[in-house]
Image (spheres, rainbow, N blue to C red):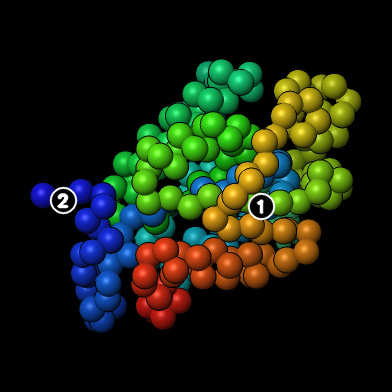
Amino acid sequence: MFNGKDTMKNTAVLLGKTIINPGGFTIWLTGLSGCGKSTIADALAEKLQFNGHRPQRLDGDVIRQHLCKELGFSKEDRDENIRRATFLAKLLTDSGVITITTFISPYRELREYARKTIGSFMEVYVKCPIEVCMQRDPKGLYQKAIAGEIKNFTGVSDPYEAPTQPDVLLESDKETVEECVAKIIGKLDELMGAPLQSIA
Ligand SMILES: Nc1ncnc2c1ncn2[C@@H]1O[C@H](COP(=O)(O)OP(=O)(O)OP(=O)(O)O)[C@@H](O)[C@H]1O
Ligand SMILES: [Mg+2]
């Protein structure tokens, strides 16, 4: 019988080498808007791809455009958004995919729900002072939120419950994107017992 837990033990042939199949895993990035979740996740996915993996990205903006079109930013809608994302991440993870999710996911309870539901899971907190996020403001959203044009904006007019014990802590105002990616890969190696870096 093939199930999610067993994927960690399977072997696979990749690029002519027999390796321990790292199996499925969800890397769950959380943090304020503009902290760098999507930037770091894209760089991580590129690195994993270069090393012969086929990672999948689940991004908040994309999921909201397609799967969660009718949802807004009330607590109920945010929770439903994360429940649907968790469902997708679990399907992918159980199918052996390294799944990298980028949702603000401000509520601790829902992140714990994702961890429990998905199983093979790591929480990555992309920490960044809100002043720096506001300065970056890559989508111009903080400006609108401060002007009152956007309601329920995390960090401005809506809460963000920071992780207290993330599996990986990144400080994107102090560490480069490359350093952040290396820290996540280091943790993956540790948790999965397979040297992802050496697969290329
Ligand atoms: N060390 C760093 N890590 C990540 N991003 C950084 C870093 N230094 C600067 N940046 C910049 O910060 C911005 C982060 O934007 P990004 O869209 O990745 O944030 P996000 O967390 O995905 O936000 P949102 O929740 O709104 O989608 C980018 O413009 C990126 O170039
Ligand atoms: Mg993003």
Three-letter residue code for mark 2: Phe
| Chain-order first, disc 2 or disc 1 | 2
Query: Residue 25, percent across and down?
Result: 38, 54
- Residue 154 appears anywhere in the view: yes
Q: Residue at x 57, y 25 (%)?
A: 78
Nearest the viewer among 11 and 164 is 164
Name the side, left or right, on which 177 lies relative to 6: right
Query: Residue 183, percent across and down?
Result: 58, 67
The circle on residue 179 is: none
Q: Residue at x 78, y 59 (%)?
A: 173
Q: Is residue 6 above or below residue 149?
A: below
Q: Residue at x 45, y 38 (%)?
A: 114
Q: Residue at x 88, y 25 (%)?
A: 147
Three-letter residue code for mark 1: Val
Name the side, left or right, on which 30 lies relative to 13: right
Per the image, the residue denoted by label 2 is 2
Disc 1 CB within 8 Å of nearest ligand 1 atom: yes
Name the side, left or right, on which 132 lies relative to 67: right
The residue tagged with tag 2: helix, strand or loop?
A: loop
Most extreme residue toward the left, as rendered? 1
